[in-house]
Amino acid sequence: MKKIKYIALGVLATLLSGCGNDWLDLQSSTAIETEGSLTELRDFEFVLNGAYSSMQSSNYYGADMVCYGDLTGDDMKSYKSSSTNVSYYTFKYNKTNGPSGFWGMYYGVAKNLNILLRDIEKIELVPDREIMTPKQEKLTEQVYHDDLKGEALAIRALLLFDVTRLYGYPYLKDNGASLAAPIIDKVVEDKNFKPSRNTTAQCYKAITDDLIEAVKLLRPVKKEGKINKWAAMTLLSRVYLYMGNNGEAYNVATEAIKGAEKQGYKLWTNDEYAKIWATPFNSELLFEIVNLTTDSPGKSSIGYLCTKYNLIATEKYWKKYMKEKSDDVRSQMVSTASSSKPFCLKYPAQGDKSYEDANIPIFRLSELYLNAAEAAVKKDDITNTRKYLKPIYARTGENLDDLSDDAITLDLVLEQRRIEFWGEGQRFFDLIRNNKKVERTDYLSEVPEEARSFDWNYYKIVLPVPNHEMEYNENMVQNPEYELH
């Protein structure tokens, strides 16, 4: 047998387990053999499981990505100065000590996905021949091939989207001219490969290209713990909103709503809302990251950090949307109406699992409705804004039909996004991409004055390129404002 060479996931290798994931019926992998090991389609599913497992990491959606999107905004805060991820809340980082996990995650997982995407095209298919997948589904080779490829493209797009919005200024600030992240979209054989940063516009072009292709390839079915067609379309519609391409955002979102609901997805009712978070794979969840007791981030997880009040609701948010709007079913997602530690209840114990092992919702049907409503209101299409906002607004306990057309505004839509996705890591990005101010009215004393009220002109709305990358890679440049401070 020939000697096998591996490409490992760098820093992730020490963070992630290589143990089996029963829910996938396949062992996951954080390293790929580079010479001739991927010979059957099921081998590629094995590789994809490694990518999904990596997404569980506390350095990514397991905790940090969610914490960052909420703690940098105005509706959540660190409970005390020693809370986990307090630096996101205080913005107290500079070019030498900025967060590095996001950057490493993208590099590591994208490298493996690129190997998959290269080698899956080398498989000699008998397109109409039926095979049994590891999930005991009978599919033709062509359908199975396309579905695996679509998942890989969608995950790669999500990774690039996240590092782009973390390290590059909002697309609409300068039409994508700022530098973001390197686009890693090909297999790199050179161990000394040292990429340079691409512009935000170039990154968004790569993201949308991957997602458009992924949507064509992915099966329009429910897939527990894996990205399906409707999840990829949710991300694509969100990306279009970030770019200001409201026509495409609307078209993709509305098409996805029709397709997903035809497949059996539906919005939660008001009666279901508070309790259904404890039920994995329910009617509104298009894609969630699955945690098991054997492979979750544990005490580093977002479920643990919320429940142990490392991050809690701000007084402003609690009073306006939780205490005073008690008819809103979403007010039940805060721990109590009187505690000084009002934490998020969206990561409860599920089945026989602890809250430490709660699954992490990434794309919900409700986002498609809100994406469609936001795109419509930005096109001055009040009729369709009403149509798609109404079922979400009903969660307030009120009827949108009681509001005049003049009241159907972008601010109203963003307010519903604010309540709907509280604790899910979207608030900061929704404000900044629309050049709305982040206004913090109650905060720890450690929060500097410059981080109490800011918009997209504040240089720290983007992260500094990690110091180790700057030291190792002479082709890398730092976000310029960090060089001045």
Image: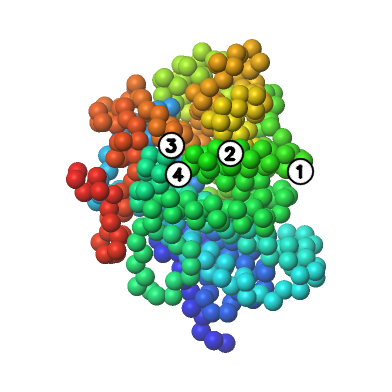
Q: Nearer the viewer, mark 4 or mark 1?
A: 1
Q: Which mark is residue 65?
A: 4
Mark 3 / mark 2, whichever is N-terminal:
2
Q: Quadrant of residue 42?
A: bottom right
Mark 4 / mark 2, whichever is N-terminal:
4
Q: Which residue does the image show at 44% across and 33% down from the upper left?
A: 434
Q: Nearer the viewer, residue 136 or 441?
A: 441
**Chosen colour scheme:** rainbow
| Residue under label 1 | 263
Q: How many marks?
A: 4
Q: Which residue does the image show at 48% across and 74% down from the upper left?
A: 6
Labelled pair 3, 2 in contact (Cβ < 8 Å) = no
Q: CA gap, disc 1 to disc 3? A: 32 Å
Q: Is residue 291 left or right of residue 457?
A: right
| Residue under label 3 | 433
Q: CA gap, disc 4 to disc 1? A: 29 Å
Mark 2 / mark 1, whichever is N-terminal:
2
Amino acid found under the numbered disc labelled 4: Met
Q: Nearer the viewer, mark 2 or mark 1?
A: 2
Seen in the picture, residue 478 relative to 366 is either above or below; the reply is below
| Residue under label 2 | 247
